[in-house]
Amino acid sequence: MSDCEWGRPCTCRECCTQFRQEICPMCGFENVVELEGTGEFRTDNKGMRYAEITPPTGDPMNLECFKCSHVIINVKFYSRISILACESKINRDEINESSRPCDDCNKKIRYSIGGYQSIELFEHNGKYVCKECLSERIKKENQDPTNRDEKYIFDSRELKWVLSKVRVHCETCGKSRWLLQENSWKKQCSSCYKMA
Ligand SMILES: [Zn+2]
Ligand SMILES: [Zn+2]
Ligand SMILES: [Zn+2]
Ligand SMILES: [Zn+2]
């Protein structure tokens, strides 16, 4: 296990690498390049160890755009093009171009562990909306049925109001109290129950 996973000063290759964007003047693609620096451990005046990262230096170079192959001349020195980061951006752009946005919030894509994905849309009264917006719409369209003796909450997964608490009168003392729906069978309040 490398030190960097614990937030300690570290000079491994990953911790010494910074990223920079180079936008292609031909196609507008945001190329990502890596700058692999060198790291050295130092101690500050309080005795704390830290890693000092020195970025690499060198003459300006050419960069072949990862998307359209146009050669961008004389960009600042870089170590290498970041293939992973560029592929991820291409993937994001492709999904973005082919996706329909949510009619309410305009979102098109989301990022999850597996990469970028288009947002799932649901048809609702002639509109196409994402799950969150669908939930908001249904919540607004259906009045909260809460009354004197029942409290409802909106379940955004089930997309409906569900009974959460009920007001029950104690059989012994007659006082009313709010109980969770699943406890509504309890006939006595807790003080009467303890006395019995
Ligand atoms: Zn590290
Ligand atoms: Zn390009
Ligand atoms: Zn939405
Ligand atoms: Zn009671």
Image (cartoon, rainbow, N blue to C red):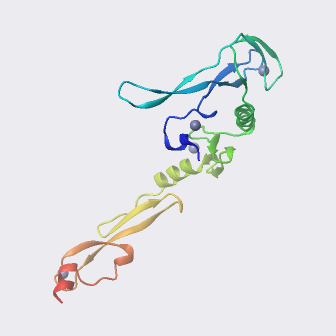
Image vertical order of residue 177 relative to residue 143, above or below? below
Picture residue at 74% right of the left edge, 18% below the top: 24
Q: Between residue 75 and residue 121, name the one nearer to us.
A: 75
Q: Between residue 111 and residue 188, name the one nearer to us.
A: 111
Q: Quadrant of ligand 2?
A: top right
List the single residue furthest toward the bottom. 196
Q: Between residue 89 and residue 104, name the one nearer to us.
A: 89
Image vertical order of residue 14 relative to residue 164, above or below? above
Percent position of residue 42, x then y: 48, 26
Image vertical order of residue 90 relative to residue 160, above or below? above
Percent position of residue 58, x then y: 69, 12
List the single residue furthest toward the right. 69
Percent position of residue 144, x then y: 40, 59
Picture residue at 22% right of the left edge, 74% below the top: 176
Number of marks: 0
Percent position of residue 188, x then y: 24, 83
Whether residue 77 is visible, yes or no, is yes
Q: Between residue 17 and residue 72, name the one nearer to us.
A: 17
Direction from residue 51 to residue 169 in the image, left or right: left
Picture residue at 40% right of the left edge, 25% below the top: 44
Direction from residue 70 to residue 196 in the image, left or right: left
Direction from residue 154 to residue 81 in the image, left or right: right
Picture residue at 83% right of the left edge, 21% below the top: 69
Image vertical order of residue 196 relative to residue 138, above or below? below
Whether residue 145 is visible, yes or no, is no
Q: Quadrant of residue 12?
A: top right
Q: Quadrant of the C terminus?
A: bottom left
